[in-house]
Amino acid sequence: MISDRPSVIDDNKLRFDSFISDKKPLFDGRKRRLPAMGWNSWNAFGSGNTEELTKAMVNKIKELELYKYGYEYIVLDDGCYRPERVDGRLQSDPVKFPSGFKAMADFVHGNGLKFGMYNDIGTKLCSGAEVGIYGYEKTDCEDYIRWDIDFIKVDNCYYMWDNATFAAPENAKYSYAPNIRSIEVAGGFYSAVKDAIITGTRAEVKDDYVTFIGTFDGTGPENSPTGLRSSELIFDVLAPDAGEYDLIVTYATGAEEGVGQWLQIAVNDEMIFDDLMAETESKDDFRSSEPFKVTLESGVNTIRLMNHRRQENTLHSYAEIKRELINAGGDRDIVFSICEWGKTQPHDWGNKVGNSWRILNDITFQVGSDGDHGTAAWESDYTTSITSQYNKAVIMDEYAGLDFGWNDPDMLVIGMDGIDMTMNISHMAMWCMLNSPLMLGLDLRRVSKGDEIFDLITNEDLIALDQDALGIQAKRIFTTYECDDPALSYIRDNDRIDVLAKPLAGGDIALGFFNLSTSEKTLDKKIDVDLILQKIGFKMEDAARFKDASSYSVKDLFTKETKSVDEKVFSVPALPGCGCKVLRITPVA
Amino acid sequence: MTTDAFIRELCSIFGEEYEGVYDRAVKCGWLDTEDLLFKDRTITRKNAARIIHMYLLKVSGLSDISGISGAEKLRDLYDCRVCTNHVAQVYLRGIMDAKDLSKDGGFLWFDLDGEDDPETNRMYLKRAAKYAARSLD
């Protein structure tokens, strides 16, 4: 049923404080799995996908033998449901999928492939279809299990408890704390501006109060994913004796980006309040709260005022779906693809329920349809380009891994209009170095064995990087752009070359050189073994053997040429605009 | 104006047969099942944009404008990911207008969930028909 407010959170594993301290999955039995590979209908056909088209894609995957390279999931994205429920249950669109989802699943399974579906944690799907999973988690998951799904992608449109992208602006009352002017407790008065510490980078001082106490919207490309993105207001308060005291908060509520109504209060890390405050006349009309009973120790106590509900509510909603899938189907090992677009910093918590998490809004909004390839771009000011996605994902390697899950810079746009083959090649190489899920997004009827797109998407040397058993995302170890730390600096200026290094099983590494700019560039710097070991040595299987090697066997993963390098440095010739070179380096004893 | 009235008007302006239009158009891909199921609801601007764009693409055979960055001046362009291209295509072609929420002309807004009066919707459909005719000449 649809609630009038966010759920009570009674499990500390869903709390912000657990995002760092307890990274274990919420549910038992999670598999250590590599990034998923397959085909998803969205970039190819948008809302216009049909049963007929999906079957054609399955047949084409068989004909091209793409399953031999690892492409195994066939995922129906948005646009496949009847736009309203029937007797409270989901149904397939009667025109597009007349045979129903179970028949579709059977067809996919009958061809030796796996079947994936799509839903949304809100009340509607992004297409507007009124069949979002919120309030229907149990029945929908029962149906998904009945339909034998192997994969589910869950989107984030029309979510009730967040004001940011694709949600109602007034929902800010749930995702931000009120403006805070002061607190009073144990005979002391504490100004928010003068006496409190503001953590993170979101909150700010305005006049005599603190505002924007909450979490960034990470949907757009503006903000770095690294560092502490949420803000709290922390007071150290003095109690003369241990005992119970009244805490009074002076605050003002709002319902717009930066100022809300939901407040969390923790005293010495125990949550004592997590709810809506009484509404004030306006966001500038401060009032004193009713007294909160708090237990303090003698001496200094920590009182935290915050609102981490933007992250916690979203995690809670995804966890409900995961729980109901398990309840309905036991341990079916269904791949759970979180698609909340990086909005609530899912790299902090996605590992608790999911196998991957999208890091930004879509890579393209100009998706194709039957007969139209759709359009993608190499660069853009928003998220809608290969480099926009790459620029964020490339500094997120520490969040990914077999024990966690995968950063997802969205589905491949290989084959769409607007990008040439050089861009396609770099795009595929980037996604493989970044351990991204590899979901093809083109009409496969355009592909033939031996053509350049086929050769690219079946480049086994590249796929081997993505699917390497170590499961370690590449780290950027050098960039020609001047910055503090290539591994962590969020760089959006594409006039540069990046060098990425990736540890591989067996002691090899992959070294990727990417020219992000659209003109030819030469990398003057040679990448030496010491730099590689300094940056990724601690993650390598046998760093000593790599260091002490007498020579290195270096394979170009596109030309397939292998050469022996006796020096302890690696370099590449000039790179064309948007071009790349990816080497697999094996130490020779 | 309801979605059904909008589709009737489209049929009239483009010379499309109204009888059986929902079946034909859903199969062709310029209407969605929701247009039939919710045909008595007032049409929103984002749905008007979708129907006009998809009609031009699927029936009139007009390829999309490839770069849509010119529409980024619309502050709500990315507020609905499935609407973005529809909105951009009708806006960049001068078929549907944006709204300006500031006095000095600096805050353009498509108003995705807004509704237009019947006259305005008719004007947009006529502009679309003219655009298609011009493009096909």
Image (tube, coloured by chain):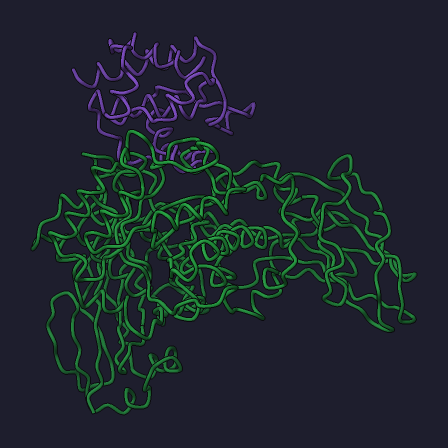
Chain colours: A green, B purple
The residue lying at 83 percent from left, 54 percent from top is A292
- Nearer-the-camera pick, A554 or A503: A503
Residue B48 in percent (x, y) is at: 39, 21
Image quadrant occupied by the N terminus of chain A:
top right
> In percent of the image, x 31 and y 68: which residue is there?
A499
**Residue A381 appears anywhere in the view:** no
| Residue A251 x, y percent position in the rendering | 78, 46
Q: Nearer the viewer, residue A24 or A582?
A: A24
List x then y, in percent, for residue A313.
Answer: 58, 51
Q: Where, quadrant-wise, is the C terminus of chain A in this rendering? A: bottom left
Left/right placement of residue A292 relative to residue A410 reads right
Q: Is residue A548 above or below residue A231?
A: below
**Quarter-wise, where is residue A450 in the image?**
bottom left
Does residue B8 appear to the left or right of A9 in the view shown?
left
Residue A442 on image: x %, y %: 22, 45
In the depicted structure, whether residue A424 falls above or below residue A284: below
Q: Could you say which is closer to the camera, residue A34 or residue B73?
A: A34
| Location of residue A331 with respect to A248 vertically, above or below | below
What residue is shown at x 39% (from left), y 68% (from top)? A31
Residue positioned 61% across, 42% down in the render: A257
Up-down relation of residue A496 to residue A398 (above or below): above
Query: Which residue ends up furthest to the left in the rendered image?
Result: A450
